Image (cartoon, grey):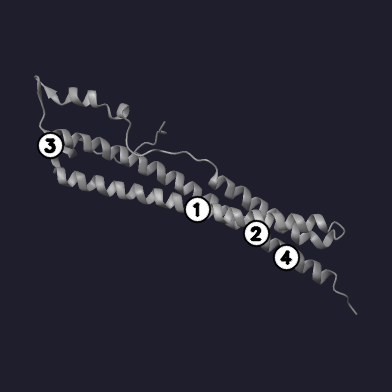
Amino acid sequence: MKPFVPPIYKVTTETAFYLSLDVLKLFYDNAQKRLADYQKQANDTTERAYKTLAIYATLLTLLCAYVFTHPDLAWRTVPVWFLLAGTALSTFWMMRVVMPRDYMPLGNTVKDSQPNEYAVSFTTDGESSDDDMQMRLVLRDELNQLEQSIRWQDQVHSRRVRLFGRSLKSILYGICAAMLSYFIFIFRLKPTG
């Protein structure tokens, strides 16, 4: 089921009558290109997220192994704990990026397209409207559907990009905290004399 996203812009029936069929088709093709671009971006983000997640999992494994094999170095492992915390938080955010996400399939189902209702509305006094008029109205509805899909895809992609950014910031903050604690540890324990 497609989630409801109110369209920012809606093609009206009057517009469909005033514009030529070729112009309407051009708008439709442009909208399809935009939606295809969003879908490519979503696939690229997912691919990068899986690669980054594999790196994070490797780092988590290494850091945990170091902490578990050096329990006697309590204060000296504080930087490692900061790295571990930053990497764990980054992994959490990256998991949110790759978790199963909502999906809006392209186009309409036959039920959503409602060909029977179109046929009734295109018939007056037992005669069918011309093909040009039918195509205009179908294109109008498809353009409105594409606008809704584009808006929805934009919202979903923006959220995933923010999560990806949080993940990268988290690991960076973990590295900075580890470096700071390491320097504090070094300069605090530096022998004076």
Q: Which residue is mark 2?
A: 173
**Callout 1 crowding tier (Cα within 10 Å): few <14, some 14–19, many ≥20:** few
Outermost residue to the top: 125
Residue under the point 57% across and 53% down: 166
SS for callout 4 = helix
**Callout 2 crowding tier (Cα within 10 Å): few <14, some 14–19, many ≥20:** some
| Residue 132: mark in rendering | 3
Q: Position of residue 26 (x, y in %)?
A: 21, 48
SS for callout 3 = helix
Q: Earlier in the sequence, mark 2 or mark 3?
A: 3
Q: Which residue is mark 4?
A: 180
Q: Is residue 119 left or right of residue 147?
A: left
Outermost residue to the right: 193
Instruction: For marks 2 and 1, give the CA distance.
Output: 24 Å
Q: Earlier in the sequence, mark 4 or mark 1?
A: 1
Instruction: For marks 4 and 2, give the CA distance.
Output: 10 Å
Q: Is residue 35 visible?
A: yes
Q: Which amino acid type is shown beneath numbered disc 4?
A: Leu
Q: Nearer the viewer, mark 2 or mark 1?
A: 1
Q: Position of residue 32 (x, y in %)?
A: 30, 46
SS for callout 1 = helix
Q: Earlier in the sequence, mark 4 or mark 2?
A: 2
Q: Nearer the viewer, mark 2 or mark 3?
A: 3
Viewer-nearest residue: 56 or 179: 56
| Residue 134: mark in rendering | none
- Identify the image quadrant of residue 131: top left
Instruction: For marks 1 and 3, give the CA distance.
Output: 43 Å
Q: Which residue is mark 1?
A: 47
